[in-house]
Each structure stands twice: as C-alpha cells, then as structure tokens.
C-alpha cells in the first residue's frame, strides 16, 4: 500500500515537473495534474494520522506539510484553500479518534490554536510565494525591455525568433522583414541611445 502511494506521488511529481519545466506554473487554470499534485500530500497526511492514531506524540503536525507544499507552489489563495481542507481532516480526525462522542464545538475549541497555526502558515508561505512570483515577473520584464523606450530589446527578439523558428512548419512558415532607417545614427547621437 505504501509503495503504491509512493509510485503515485512520484508519477504526479514527474508529470507536474515535465509540464512546467523551466517556467512558472500559470495561475489561471487548474488541470488534473495540478489536482493530483496538490491533493496527494493531503491524502498521505490524512491517511497517516488515521493509521498512526495516537501512537505518536502529536501526529496532527504532519497536516502542516500539505499546506506548506500547496502555498509554496500555488501562492496565498491555494495555500488558504489547502489550510481549509486540512482543517477539515484535522477536525474529522479529532472527532473520531481523539475526542470520540464529543460535540463539534468542543473539538474546534480543543484544536483552535493548531487551526490558527495552519491558516497562518498557509497565508505566510503563500504571500512569500506570490511576492517571489511578482518579483520574477518584474525582473523578466526589466530584462526584456529597453529602459528608455519601453520597447522589447534584442535579447527578447532573439528568444522570440528562436521560438517562432521552432514552431514553424511547411504550412506555417516564418517570415522576417528588416527595415533600415537611413542616418538614424545622427538621431541616436543627438537624443541618446
């Protein structure tokens, strides 16, 4: 059983990494690969605390891992959503295993501090991930544009040209037009490069 979970997790991570190799994951759509990648740690953590029960000192701490993984890969909103799902698993575990027969409110009261920690970690790690994503996008924009004109620079042109050449086929060829402006050197010398 454990080996099958490990193989499923390895397959999900491999699919996810092959899908987003070298790029940041998009934030607009959520595919089945993303779902498997994000729900697998929650499934493993949930099964672990139900299997281990009270043989470990504080098995609920493993529920922090899915929150950290989701917040560090997806950002603040996915981190908080995973924190909510993790809280559901925690309350179910506490109601069935730790405090059987007690009311839902007493279970929430007993776990209130840990629930708060789960949400704070999801929020904090998610905000850090969102800030890093914004900084990367800003650095990419700065690396690809000219500071004076705001136009794309030669580096961006070379990258896009390579991309278009790789996508070119017999039915969709690539065309390139060069335009030369006579005596443009005088303009650059007068108004700056």
Image (cartoon, rainbow, N blue to C red):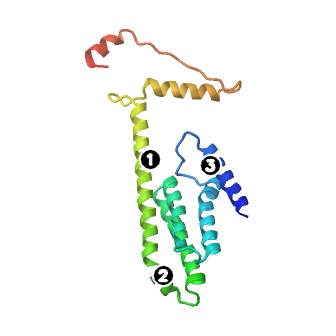
Task: Find the residue positioned furthest to the left.
Answer: 190
Within 10 Å of the Cα at label 2, are there few (<14), some (14-19), or many (20+) other Cα atoms? Answer: some
Q: Earlier in the sequence, mark 1 or mark 2?
A: 2
Q: Tell me where residue 172 appears, x and y as whole percent.
A: 67, 27
For the point 39% across and 9% down, which residue is it?
Answer: 182
As displayed, is residue 32 above or below residue 142? below
Q: Earlier in the sequence, mark 1 or mark 3?
A: 3
In front of the other: 84 or 188: 84
Q: Tell me where residue 42 appears, x and y as whole percent.
A: 59, 65
Where the N terminus falls, by quadrant?
A: bottom right
Compute the Cα span from label 2 to label 3.
Answer: 35 Å
Within 10 Å of the Cα at label 3, are there few (<14), some (14-19), or many (20+) other Cα atoms? Answer: some
As displayed, is residue 144 above or below residue 186? below
Q: Tell me where residue 112 appears, x and y as whole percent.
A: 44, 78
For the point 71% across and 55% down, which residue is it?
Answer: 7
Compute the Cα span from label 1 to label 3.
Answer: 18 Å
Which of the 4 quarters of the picture holds residue 163? top right
Which of the 4 quarters of the picture holds residue 92? bottom right
Q: Earlier in the sequence, mark 2 or mark 3?
A: 3
As displayed, is residue 105 above or below residue 62? below
Could you tell me which secondary element the residue under label 1 belongs to? helix
**How many numbered marks are there?**
3
Relative side of 78 to 181, left or right? right
In front of the other: 51 or 35: 51
Disc ID at residue 133: 1
Disc ID at residue 108: 2
* Residue, disc 3: 16
Task: Find the residue positioned furthest to the top.
Answer: 183
């Amino acid at each position: 059983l454990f080996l099958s979970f490990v193989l499923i997790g390895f397959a999900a991570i491999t699919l996810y990494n092959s899908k987003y190799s070298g790029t940041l994951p998009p934030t607009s759509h959520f595919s089945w690969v993303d779902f498997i990648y994000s729900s697998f740690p929650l499934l493993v953590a949930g099964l672990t605390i139900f299997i281990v029960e009270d043989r470990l000192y504080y098995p609920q701490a493993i529920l922090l891992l899915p929150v950290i993984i989701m917040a560090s890969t997806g950002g603040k909103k996915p981190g908080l959503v995973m924190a909510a799902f993790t809280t559901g698993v925690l309350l179910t575990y506490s109601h069935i295993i730790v405090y059987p027969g007690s009311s839902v409110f007493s279970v929430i009261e007993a776990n209130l501090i840990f629930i708060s920690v789960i949400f704070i970690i999801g929020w904090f790690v998610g905000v850090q991930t969102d800030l890093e994503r914004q900084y990367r996008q800003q650095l990419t924009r700065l690396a690809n544009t000219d500071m004076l004109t705001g136009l794309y620079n030669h580096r961006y042109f070379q990258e896009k040209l390579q991309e278009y050449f790789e996508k070119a086929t017999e039915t969709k060829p690539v065309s390139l037009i060069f335009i030369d402006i006579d005596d443009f050197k005088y303009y650059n010398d007068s108004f700056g490069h």
